[in-house]
Amino acid sequence: MKALNAVRIQGVDVLPLLEGGKGISATNGLSSGAWAGADGIGTVSAVNADSYDADGRVIPQIYRGKTRRERHDELVQFGIDGGLAQVKRAHEERNGRGRLHVNILWEMGGAERVMKGVLEGARGLVHGVTCGAGMPYRLAEIAASFGVNYYPIVSSARAFRALWKRAYHKFSGFLGGVVYEDPWLAGGHNGLSNSEDPLRPEDPYPRVVELRRQMNEAGLNDVPVIMAGGVWYLRDWQHFIDNPEVGPVIFQFGTRPLLTKESPIPEGWKRRLLSIKPGEVLLHRFSPTGFYSSAVRNSFLDELNERSERQIAYSAEPVGDHHAALAIGARGRLVYVTAHDKQRAQGWVEQGFTEALRTPDHTIVFVSPAKAREIHKDQIDCMGCLSACRFSNWSQGEEGTTGKKADPRSFCIQKTLQDIAHDGEVEQNLMFAGHGAYQFATDPFYSNGFIPTVKQLIDRLLTGD
């Protein structure tokens, strides 16, 4: 195994090992502070982070606003308060070692307001901002205004080129690194483009080499590429180390830090990670963001898949093959479907899926009355956790809506991520993970259910394993 050379970030030498900043309460001040304290780069998630009362108890995020806009403003304040609480704790935990970043999802509701609020309240404590899930054009300007580095997450050289030409070239001095996140292997939301096949993973090496070529053309030869997604054993990435085609490189670990003593995820989630088998992490497109994302296949994802399978196209008037009348809804309004689809629909109704919900794509899905009530309630309770949500049709723009019909084939992502992060049932919630998570069960480091400290994990990573 080649030796890992330290990298210098804002005047401090650190290990080129970066903790990936997972979303809601999956990375907090304790875990990221421990990572930085081991001379790495810790990343606090500033996505709906937990804040605490005077006794150190987590403050439940209960929304009291009567409108979506009012609840959205509450959500932003929760985000700022939680981000500050976690950054301050991480700063204390790192004991002056390593570097500390915060992670922001650009597509989350109020992203700019949360970022500014956290950076303003934590001046001098944060050394960088990592940002992905969208095209964060204003990331550079905001980070530079607070004197911190920025680290955009991209999945292709083309995406970086667009960001660079539109905005980043104006703030090149604050570009701390570019995160290349493998869109087929990373956990959470993935940056697959419409031209890429989700079933045909591509070798990351030529994609990273192309990214480096673009960076070098822009004079960014010394700016590191941060390899994220699919990184488990560093011995498998030796061809990236000290390679002039790749240039300076840092390795990001997102899934492995979930299983540490300091990791804030509940014990049930940790136990499930130890039993994941190959192929059990599913790349799917149910997310209300509209992006692909990777999560552990469980009852939650199975229900979403089955819900979409109980779906047929319809027309408001008889047209072509759509001539079979089907009564839907409490008022029995007629829509027109094919004769074959009418038979299918009648079969679903007989199985108890009696509620027909319209989608934005002129289809209807059939669900049980209980599921229909849950979907309807979640849509009504929307607090604007995304900049635009296909599930509830919320948008943080002036109109307050995407202008499209709410999509019952998706789900409330805020609700499920908050639930699983706070002792919710792992089978009934979205559980993000990278596609290498099956290695928890095969890696001898985790034999007999062993869960390391962050320091033990980093020491292990440095051996190549």
Image: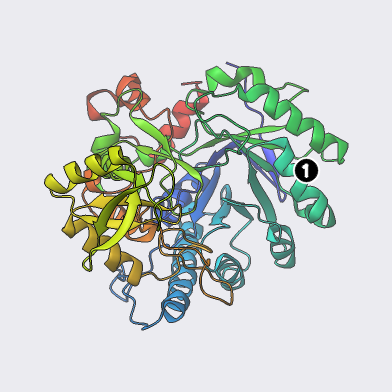
Which quarter of the rendered picture does the N terminus lie within?
A: top right
Q: Residue at x 64, y 56 (%)?
A: 127
Q: Toward which corner of the image does residue 305 lie, by quadrant?
A: top left
Q: Toward which corner of the image does residue 75 lie, by quadrant?
A: bottom left
Q: Label 1 amino acid?
A: Arg
Q: Residue at x 49, y 23 (%)?
A: 233
Read off the residue under disc 1. 161
Q: Is residue 39 visible?
A: no
Total labels: the figure holds 1
Q: Which of 49 and 345 is in front in this view?
A: 345
Determine whether, in the image, residue 45 is placed left or right of residue 273.
right
Q: Residue at x 23, y 68 (%)?
A: 331
x, y (%) of residue 240? Answer: 66, 22
From what the image shows, is residue 114 above or below residue 449? Answer: below
Q: Which of 186 and 352 is in front in this view?
A: 352
Badge 1 marks a residue whose secondary structure is helix
Q: Residue at x 73, y 58 (%)?
A: 140
Determine whether, in the image, residue 193 is placed left or right of residue 75.
right
x, y (%) of residue 367? Answer: 23, 52
Q: Can residue 327 be seen in this view?
A: yes
- As drawn, the residue found furthest toward the bottom would be 66
Q: Nearer the viewer, residue 229 or 126?
A: 229
From what the image shows, is residue 63 above or below residue 360? Answer: below
Question: Mark 1, residues whose alpha carbon is within 10 Å: few (<14), some, or many (≥20)?
Answer: some
Q: Which of 297 and 277 is in front in this view?
A: 297
